[in-house]
Image: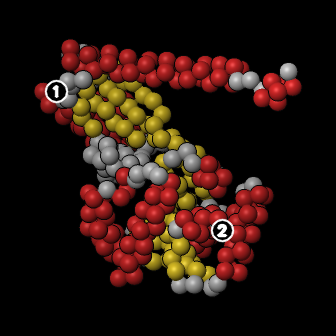
């Protein structure tokens, strides 16, 4: 819309969650005030500010937003992505006792069914050449899964793959990465890749062999990964962004990241605000029209059995 936007690094195209600013502990107030002052002094470089997928629970992010509003800026906020998570108890059996009975039953049943197909191994990799080979298996399985679904995945993009090939070793050197593999008869049929930092494990990406989907390998590897996280002493398992139903089944809690946009009184910034409001209204109207259309279709669809009888 002809306006210059100031955003978080990695705020677009990457799929990052809980974006924020990095501040030394105890310096939150002065740091956010200095950032806001600096932005106000350099308005020639931007027309409006758009901070997407911010950490809505972070006091630092809240303080930054307050500092920008104290400068007289107009703020427009909206929920961004839903992020399901699990507060992990001390044992896997205790966790399973808290989930729905059908999920618990299916997880155990599918595990037994896989055992009948041959030796089953669950392996966790955190470094070395095996991690690199396991990551290649993850990419292969992820690609197979999306080909099976007839969809495209941003994770398979050339730039994203190049990025991960660079940072994988660096993260492993710090103990920040974990890759879980599910193998049947020495064949990798599912993989789950995530970040293991502090006492929190974040599930970043998965891959599954479509030939084994009927055995529920997706459910099995997620359950085994949660079990491994508990046994490793993690206190939280975060599924990250995405409203997928399987996440809500395993999860015990839910968060939302936040989109926050800021506009000052300059004409170009006010123009950006007006266009933002128009887009929001257009989305609401479009959503309402879709709901009404679906209702009309459901009402207008004749009951075939009744028509035949008539």
**Along the line of sight, which residue is nearer the eye, 102 or 156?**
156
Q: Which mark is residue 30?
A: none
Query: Residue 301: x and y, percent?
Result: 70, 24
Name the residue at 45% across, 30% down: 78
Residues at marks 1 and 2, CA–CA distance in whole angstroms: 57 Å
Query: Residue 231: x and y, percent?
Result: 60, 74
Dot 1: few (<14), some (14–19), or many (≥20) neighbours within 10 Å?
A: few
Query: Residue 222: x and y, percent?
Result: 59, 64
Which-is-in-front pick, marks 1 and 2?
2
Q: Residue 195's image quarter? A: bottom left
Q: Residue 264's image quarter? A: top left
In the displayed orientation, state which residue is furthest to the right. Answer: 309
Mark 1 lies on a secondary structure that is helix
Name the residue at 34% across, 50% down: 14
Mark 2 lies on a secondary structure that is helix
Q: How is the image coloured?
A: secondary structure
Residue 99 appears in the rendering: yes
- Does 193 sit left or right of 45 as displayed? right
Lower sequence index among marks 1 and 2: 1
Q: Is residue 286 above or below residue 81?
A: above
Q: Which mark is residue 215?
A: 2
Viewport quadrant of the C terminus: top right
- Does 214 sit left or right of 242 as displayed? right
Location of mark 1 (residue): 43
- Does 19 sit left or right of 310 as displayed? left
Name the residue at 37% across, 46% down: 19
Residue 23 appears in the rendering: no
Q: Is residue 264 above or below residue 228?
A: above
Q: Is residue 187 above or below residue 19?
A: below
Dot 2: few (<14), some (14–19), or many (≥20) neighbours within 10 Å?
A: some
Viewport quadrant of the N terminus: top left
């Amino acid at each position: 819309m002809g306006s210059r936007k100031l955003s978080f690094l990695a705020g677009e195209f990457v799929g990052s969650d809980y974006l924020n600013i990095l501040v030394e502990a105890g310096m939150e107030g002065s740091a956010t005030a200095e950032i806001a002052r600096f932005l106000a002094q350099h308005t020639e470089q931007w027309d409006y500010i758009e901070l997407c997928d911010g950490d809505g629970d972070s006091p630092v992010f809240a303080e930054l937003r307050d500092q920008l509003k104290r400068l007289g800026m107009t703020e427009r906020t909206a929920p961004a992505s839903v992020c399901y998570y699990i507060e992990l108890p001390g044992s896997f059996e205790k966790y399973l006792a808290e989930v729905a009975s059908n999920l618990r039953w299916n997880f155990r049943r599918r595990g037994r069914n896989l055992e009948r197909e041959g030796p089953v191994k669950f392996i966790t990799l955190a470094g070395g050449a095996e991690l690199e080979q396991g990551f290649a298996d993850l990419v292969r399985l992820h690609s197979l899964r999306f080909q099976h679904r007839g969809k495209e995945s941003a994770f398979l993009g050339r730039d994203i793959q190049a990025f991960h090939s660079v940072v994988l070793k660096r993260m492993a050197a710090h103990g920040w990465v974990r890759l879980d593999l599910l193998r049947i008869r020495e064949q990798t049929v599912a993989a789950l890749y995530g970040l293991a930092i502090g006492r929190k494990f974040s599930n970043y990406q998965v891959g599954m062999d479509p030939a084994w989907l009927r055995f529920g390998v997706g459910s099995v590897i997620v359950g085994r990964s949660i079990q491994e996280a508990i046994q490793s002493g993690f206190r939280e398992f975060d599924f990250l962004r995405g409203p997928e139903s399987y996440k809500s089944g395993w999860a015990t809690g839910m968060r939302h990241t936040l989109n926050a946009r800021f506009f000052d009184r300059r004409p170009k910034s006010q123009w950006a605000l007006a266009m933002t409001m128009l887009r929001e209204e257009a989305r609401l109207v479009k959503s309402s029209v879709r709901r009404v259309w679906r209702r009309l279709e459901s009402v207008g669809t004749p009951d075939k059995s009744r028509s035949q009888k008539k």
